[in-house]
Amino acid sequence: MIMRTVRNQPRTTREDLVNDLKAAGTIVTKKTIGNTLRREGLKSCSARKVPPLLKKAHVHARLKFANEHLNDSEDNWVKVLWSDETKMELFGINSTRRVWRRRNAAYYPKNTMPTVKHGGGNIMLWGCFSAKGTGQLHRIKGTMDGAMYRQILGENLLSSARALKMGRGWVFQHDNDPKHTAKATKEWLKKKHIKVLEWPSQSPDLNPIENLWRELKVRVAKRQPRNLNDLEKICKEEWDKIPPEMCANLVANYKKRSLKY
C-alpha cells in the first residue's frame, strides 16, 4: 500500500501514509515508513520546478538537443558562457515541496512542480557563468525589452568573457525569449562575432545556471536583506562568493545531470 500510494502520488508525506494505514487498521511509525521507502530505492527530494504545459514540440526539441550533445566532451561545455534571468524575492526563497523518487527521476512529471508567477517585493537579475566561475550580475530595472537586453549584454557579456578568460571559440547560451531571438539581438551578436548555442524552447531545467540561482537564493535568504537595494547589494556580494569549484563541477557533470534524465 505504501509503494502503490507513493508511485501514484510522490508528494505524499510520511504523516499522510501513517494516517492512511491507521484508517486501514495498521499502526506504523513515520520512521518505519521512511525506512521502507528507502529500502525500495526511494528517497525524499525537493520537487524540481519546471515550466508548465510543455507541448509535444517542446519535448521533441529537448530530445533533439540531448541527442545532439550526448556525446560532446567536457571540453565543449567548458567553452560555454551560460546566462539567464531570475527573480529574487525580498523575503527569502520560495517554499519547496518534497517528493519520494528514485535516483535519476528528478524530472519525471509527477516529481516536479510547475513554476508560477507572483508579485511581492523582488528584483530581477541577469547573470552569467562558465566552468571558470561567475561572471557579471546585473539588476534589471523596469520592464526589459530588446533594446535593454542588448544594452545589458553590451555592458556585461564581453567583460564577463574576458574576466573568465574564455579564450577563442567560446559559445554564448541564452534561451528563446523573444528579446533574445529578436532580429536586432541576433544582428548585435553577429556583429560582435559571438557564437550562440542553439537552445530548445521551454527548457530552463537544462541550463546549469539554475543550480547557481538556487545556491544564490539560499545564501541571500540567510543574510535577511531589509529592502530591495539591500537585496541587490547582498545578491552581488554572494554571487561573487560562489566558488569557481562549484561552477566547474556543474559543468563537469552537465551531461550526466541534464542530458540523461
Image (cartoon, rainbow, N blue to C red):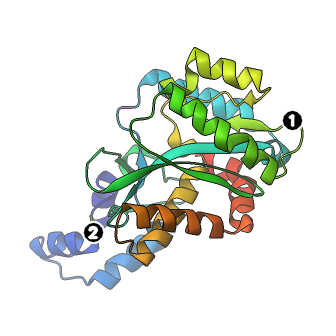
Dot 2: element: loop
Judge by depth and name the residue closer to the eye, 59 or 145.
145
Q: CA distance from mark 2 to mark 1?
A: 49 Å
Image quadrant occupied by the N terminus: bottom left
Give the residue pinned by disc 2: 13
Report x, y in % for residue 148. Answer: 52, 32
Picture coordinates of residue 45 (x, y %)? 44, 65
* Above or below: residue 18 compared with residue 151: below
Q: Is residue 72 left or right of residue 91?
A: right
Asked which quadrant contains residue 114, the reply is top left
Mark 2 or mark 1: which is in front? 1
Left or right of 51? Residue 15 is left
Q: Residue at x 65, y 30 (%)?
A: 65
Asked if residue 229 is positioned above or below residue 112 in the image, the reply reads below
**Residue name at image x 70 percent, y 25 percent:** 189
Question: Would residue 199 be found to the left or right of residue 214 on screen?
Answer: right
The answer to whether residue 45 of the structure is visible from this angle is: no
| Tag 1: amino acid | Gly
Q: Tell me the crowding category of disc 1: few under 14, some 14 to 19, or many 20 or more residues within 10 angstroms, Cα based.
A: few
Numbered disc total: 2
Taking depth in this image into account, of 229 and 176 the one nearest to the observer is: 229
Q: Is residue 44 above or below residue 124?
A: below
Q: Is residue 256 visible?
A: yes
Which residue carries the number 1 mark?
169
The x, y position of residue 168, in whole percent, is 89, 38
What residue lies at 49% left-to-right and 53% top-to-bottom? Answer: 106
Q: Residue at x 68, y 17 (%)?
A: 187
The amino acid marked with disc number 2 is Thr
